[in-house]
Amino acid sequence: MTGNESVLFRSLVEKADRKFAKVRDLPAHGRDRCDAYFRKVFKVYTKLWRFQQENRATLVEAGLKRWEIGEIASRIGQLYYQQYLRTSETRFLLESFVFYEAILKREYFKGCYGNLDLALKELRFLARFLVVCLFLNRVELVEHLSDLLKARVEECRKKFEDRHFKEWKRVVQEIVRFLKADAACMDARPLRYHEHAAPDLSFGHLSNFQLGKALKLQDALLTSYHPNEVKFTELTLDTFRMLQCLEWKPSESFFQTHSLELCENGVSGDLTAAASRVNLVDDGLDSALPAGPRKAVLYRPSVTNLIAVIATICEELPADGIFLLYISAPGKVNQSPTSSPCVNSFRHVKVGRQAVDYFSKSGPVSQTSTANCHKDNHSHSHPMNKRIEDTKDYLGGFLWLGPRGRGLNNLYPGDIIPFTRRPLFLIIDSDNSDAFKAIHGAERGEAAALLLSPGKSTFLASSAIDSTHDGSQFTFFLTSPLQAFCQLVGLCAASIDVDMYSRAENIFSSLLSQWETILCTSDCLDHVWVRVLGDPFLRQLILRFIFCRSALSLFVLSHNNSQCLPTCLPRLPDRLSPSSAIIQSSIHRLANSLRAVSYFTFTNIVNHVPSGSTFELSEIQEVG
């Protein structure tokens, strides 16, 4: 290239590349510090993008290649996607889609197969665009991109050495497996929280709501580890579902005024209109919706990394905020926790000349007391024996966050307890979730809300469902409850008669609305739940938990089997327990609409319509 325009363009590209490299390596968590970096890099890319548009003819004449324009647009799409993951604001996802879609439509990377580096750039672009389309539920475009990615990988394998594309073969296999596992949700209602689904919860409607003490979900940390779990790139199926249920579905007015004209198949206009919106600071907010929580996803973190991220989030948590921690991982009950390397290494901490036991609930205890305990080690009533039992609670069971057999990969309940100095909403999805009951009552400042999964999953056709290949049943209930209910009774939501499924959706919405009223007006609701009811995302998770617990408790294959039932701490009101008439009538009505009543055991169906209910008398039956 020659001329002042070419020199300035190259200078802008180099500057943009340097700043992009910095934000690409930033952690997924953190607040103001990371926002400042993103503002700077967006400012540079705004200037670069507009400059190449205004001087396109001169730059092309001087040697600008089409793939270079595509590379700039792809970087902007990446920045928007990264900011979406951090902020939950779907506007960033839509902007990312606009840039990626234009690259595909205009074929900016066409004809690059003779160059290995450029071929890899196109593959990375296709993979990133595919993830964006998954989040936007663009089914047809997802299938098209999946086929295109597979074809491009095959072309590259024939053109170049196979060793460069072994990892890409794995990526293609991952997306095929991911799409197969997520097929139940692809054509169903979006997982995001719809603005019309959030009722008006003014403080006057909440009998137990204490003004000034309400908490808002400000941050969420999601992580998942299972050997051979369903994933695409670094996004597992479980975290993919949880991510979406913690954000708002954009309002219709937002789509009309903010986005380009997006057709059903994903075809949009050009990048000219989008260029004026390459910024991060002020515009594009959906004024019809409140801000969503900030989210961070950790893919197979080490335990030390996970704890460090939790510490950072808790340190930066606003005064009125609550932190949601979601962990999906296998676990194990440790039969001899006191002989565990973790217990021996961290049980006593030297302070001056004495070793102090920091696991005692009653406070630090010197090693002198420990020595005295050995003189009477047969006395089970000795206080030190009680403290040892407390330690067993904290360290007796754990989750695996990595390959088994290495203590460094074990996450114990005691690792989480220090962070209960701030409000915590903890979701554990594991076959050893019961171990984390030890947190309840051991908090260090704020009582935590715990939703714990069943020890094992239950299905009508158990041989056809595998949590490793289909995602967790508990997470499925929390994110797509009606589809999970269908899966429980052996039905596929996508193959059910449209009218039947529509009736089931209406019944499901009405029963959740009724349960919500009961929950919000209960006189015996624990203070922990009272404080979070004002947040729509947490309220939705609580209601879906009640639905999950009720469905599994009444299901014939898991009826009265505690190992197959989820648990919450503190307890929720008895009126919303699976044995109550209101709950059983609701589940009966839903099961009846799907012709699945025979798969449940009902003992307490009401024969009257509760006050304020939308139930129809003809749909409620007396069961002996």
Image (cartoon, rainbow, N blue to C red):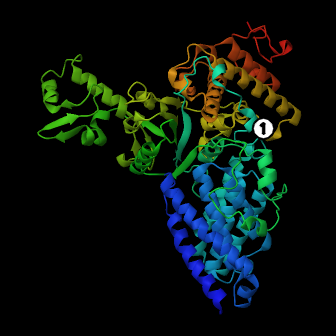
Image coordinates for residue 220, horizontal then vertical, percent: 54, 43
Image coordinates for residue 442, horizontal then vertical, percent: 38, 27
* On-image quarter of the N terminus: bottom right
Examine the image and state in which quarter residue 362 appears. Answer: top left
* On-image quarter of the C terminus: top right
Q: Residue at x 32, y 26 (%)?
A: 390
Q: Which residue is mark 1?
A: 493
Q: Residue at x 77, y 16 (%)?
A: 613
293 versus 591 height, above or below: below
SS label for mark 1: helix
288 versus 9 height, above or below: above
Q: How many marks?
A: 1
Image coordinates for residue 41, horizontal then vertical, percent: 57, 67
Toward the bottom, the furthest residue is 2
Residue 303 in sight from this viewpoint: yes
Residue 124 in sight from this viewpoint: no
Examine the image and state in which quarter residue 360 appears. Answer: top left
**Amino acid type of the residue tagged 1 in the rendering:** Ala
Q: Nearer the viewer, residue 265 or 56?
A: 56
Q: Nearer the viewer, residue 564 or 511?
A: 511
Q: Is residue 570 toward the left or the right of residue 338 in the image? A: right
Q: Nearer the viewer, residue 33 or 227?
A: 33
Image coordinates for residue 441, horizontal then vertical, percent: 40, 24
Mark 1 is surrounded, within 10 Å at the Cα level, by few (under 14), some (14 to 19) or many (20 or more) other residues, namely many
Q: Residue at x 55, y 76 (%)?
A: 15
